[in-house]
Amino acid sequence: MQVRYEKEADQALIRAKNVAVIGYGAQGHAHALNLRDSGVNVIVALQAGARREAQARGDSFEIVSVAEATRRADVLVMCAPDEVMPDLYAAEIAPYLRDGQTLMFVHGFAVHFGFISAPAGVDVAMVAPKGPGKALREAFTRGGGLPCIVAVAQDASGGAAALAYSYGAAIGCGRAGMIESSFKIETEGDLYCEQVVLCGGLTHLIRTAWEVQVEAGTPPELAYFDCLHEVKLLSDLIHERGIAGMHLAISNTAEYGEYVTGPRVIDARVKDAMRAVLADVQSGKFAREWIAEHRAGGPNLARMREAAAAHPIEEAGRTVRRMLGKT
């Protein structure tokens, strides 16, 4: 694994560019603020009526349209949501692109799955922090940073990689490590792990375990403590020490239970299901379905979001959080 650090990147490269951050959401606000604090000339591009416009103005950024940003900037930082980006690119970016510009992505979805294809004279690179924008900003303001993945999909100028590492250093990732990779590896790995572990797998495991415990007679709030509340405590230990290190911080009873019961829950059938999920990600099936869902107005997303919010574990959670003074 090739890793570079701040001292190996020339931040003068990105400081010499006019940079437009397109979008001011989860990633966009952190990139814009960190770049500006590193001495980079930054404007923010938003669509009319954007929800984050007041926030961006409150942070003292110049706000322009996406088309105007494309005309003015040397580097366009693509921070719009995955599902929005293809149509936004086609309507407000592609008509105004010129040779010598750089499209800088923070996630490889749109490029890897072919929803965006840049002209031959445009550099296409990616700097993808390994964490949400809030964490990226907080780490930067503390003098640290998050690791990131750096990749180049199109190097028209011959300097796309150098600029990408310069950019990564300017948002603070050079302090933690900038990992050379590809759009394919970043995109497929991100989607796969979101679905089978971080979002899909974890939340369904928690809900199902809670349901079984409540059905067996445990009060919902106590089952919430057992199945959800303590997840953070264990995940923090795993994050800090690794799985083997976490074992040293829990009881022998808990550790033994992991070894004998974990394979009963996460068995060969689950592994086969994970392989099927990965195949859907790698083939582009999930990406095509998600873009189609968005273009149809998101009816299935709305229905599933409503059902998740109505699950009885949420009421138990509200009770527990009130008890703890968190809501």
Image (tube, rainbow, N blue to C red):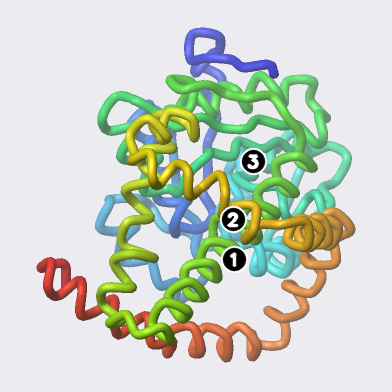
In this figure, what is the number of numbered marks?
Answer: 3
The answer to whether residue 275 is visible is yes
Instruction: Name the amino acid type tagged 3.
Output: Met
First along the sequence among labels 1 and 3: 3
Q: Is residue 133 above or below residue 284?
A: above
- Determine the CA span between mark 1 and mark 3: 28 Å
Left/right placement of residue 278 relative to residue 173 reads right
The image quadrant that residue 239 belongs to is: top left
| Element on which disc 3 rests | strand
Comparing 194 with 27, the one in front is 194
Residue 242 x/y as whole percent: 47, 31
The image quadrant that residue 280 belongs to is: bottom right
**Residue at point 40%, 40% (across, down):** 136
Q: Which residue is mark 3?
A: 104
Q: Contact (CB < 8 A) between labels 1 and 2? A: yes
Q: Is residue 136 above or below residue 287?
A: above
Which of the two marks, 2 or 3, is nearer to us in this view?
2
Q: Is residue 298 above or below residue 18?
A: below
Instruction: Name the amino acid type tagged 2.
Output: Val
Dot 3 alpha-carbon crowd within 10 angstroms: few under 14, some 14 to 19, many 20 or more = many
Which of the two marks, 1 or 3, is nearer to us in this view?
1
Residue 288 x/y as whole percent: 82, 70
First along the sequence among labels 2 and 3: 3
Q: Which residue is mark 1?
A: 200
Q: Which residue is mark 2?
A: 197
Comparing 226 with 51, the one in front is 226
Comparing 90 with 138, the one in front is 138
- Determine the CA span between mark 2 and mark 3: 28 Å
Left/right placement of residue 319 relative to residue 125 reads left
Dot 1 alpha-carbon crowd within 10 angstroms: few under 14, some 14 to 19, many 20 or more = few
Q: Contact (CB < 8 A) between labels 2 and 3? A: no
Left/right placement of residue 175 relative to residue 111 reads left
